[in-house]
């Protein structure tokens, strides 16, 4: 009985190894990662900003189109559509003159947005960045753009 069980175990191991090995045509089996459908959509289909809001950039020549929400110290909110060829949020907004600031050890520290200046040391407010409603975990220079996303700059105190 032990011999029969040993033979069956050996055959099962052989068949398992054969299934993991080469295909009948002699080529090896490889597993391809699943394709990211978002990457395909973004690369092939341009995103257009909804009508009725002010825009920055050239809507006839762009790589990314996204929304920018600005919430000032007094709570006024403005929404803009942005068309850009830049890959990072900081590059896009700085090149259009929307933001200005000073380079620091962690990248650009936003000091003004469309002329509204907030420096924490002097006003007690600073510009916080949000991506689709979630507070950003990196600086404006490191945020990669995605079509259709909403980026917010909010004057806040903490």
Image (cartoon, rainbow, N blue to C red):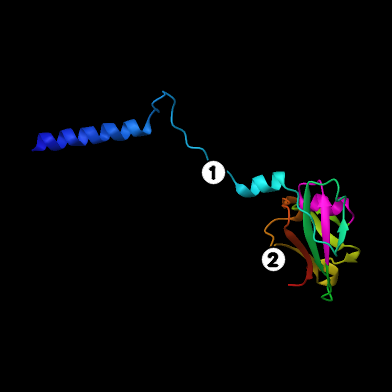
User: CA separation, marks 1 and 2?
Assistant: 28 Å
Measuring from the top left, give residue 119's x and y in whole percent.
84, 65
Magenta residues, start to end = 79-97
Measuring from the top left, give residue 19's x and y in whole percent.
34, 33
Could you tell whether 146 is left or right of 29 in the image?
Answer: right
| Residue of label 1 | 34
Q: Kindly state the secondary structure of the residue where label 1 is placed.
A: loop
Measuring from the top left, give residue 30's x and y in whole percent.
47, 33
- Residue at image location 78% in from the left, 46% down from the top: 63
Against 7, is 72 above or below? Answer: below
Crowding at mark 1 (Cα within 10 Å: few <14, some 14-19, many 20+): few
Against 78, is 66 above or below? Answer: above
* Residue 16 visible to the viewer: yes
- Residue at image location 65% in from the left, 46% down from the top: 39
Question: Is 82 part of what is drawn in magenta?
Answer: yes
Could you tell whether 27 is left or right of 1 in the image?
Answer: right
* Residue 104 visible to the viewer: no
| Picture quarter with the N terminus | top left
The extreme right residue here reads 115
Tell me the tag on residue 133. Answer: 2
Q: Kindly state the secondary structure of the residue where label 2 is placed.
A: loop
Could you tell whether 74 is left or right of 131 in the image?
Answer: right
Against 129, is 12 above or below? Answer: above
Asked where in the image residue 14 lies, by quadrant, the reply is top left
Against 124, is 113 above or below? Answer: above
Measuring from the top left, give residue 134's x and y in whole percent.
67, 64
Compare residues 48 and 96 and report the one nearer the observer. Answer: 48
Mark closer to the observer (1, 2): 1
């Amino acid at each position: 009985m032990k011999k029969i069980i040993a033979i069956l175990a050996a055959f099962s191991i052989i068949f398992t190894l054969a299934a993991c090995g080469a295909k009948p045509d002699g080529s090896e089996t490889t597993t391809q990662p699943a394709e990211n459908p978002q990457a395909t959509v973004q690369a092939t289909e341009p995103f257009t900003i909804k009508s009725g809001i002010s825009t920055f950039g050239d809507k006839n020549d762009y790589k990314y189109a996204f929304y920018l929400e600005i919430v000032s110290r007094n709570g006024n909110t403005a929404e803009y559509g942005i068309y850009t060829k830049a890959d990072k949020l900081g590059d896009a907004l700085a090149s259009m003159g929307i933001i200005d600031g000073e380079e620091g050890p962690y990248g650009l520290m936003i000091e003004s947005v469309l002329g509204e200046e907030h420096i924490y040391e002097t006003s007690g407010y600073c510009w916080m960045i949000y991506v689709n409603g979630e507070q950003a975990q990196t600086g404006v220079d490191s945020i990669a753009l995605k079509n259709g996303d909403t980026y917010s700059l909010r004057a806040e105190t903490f």
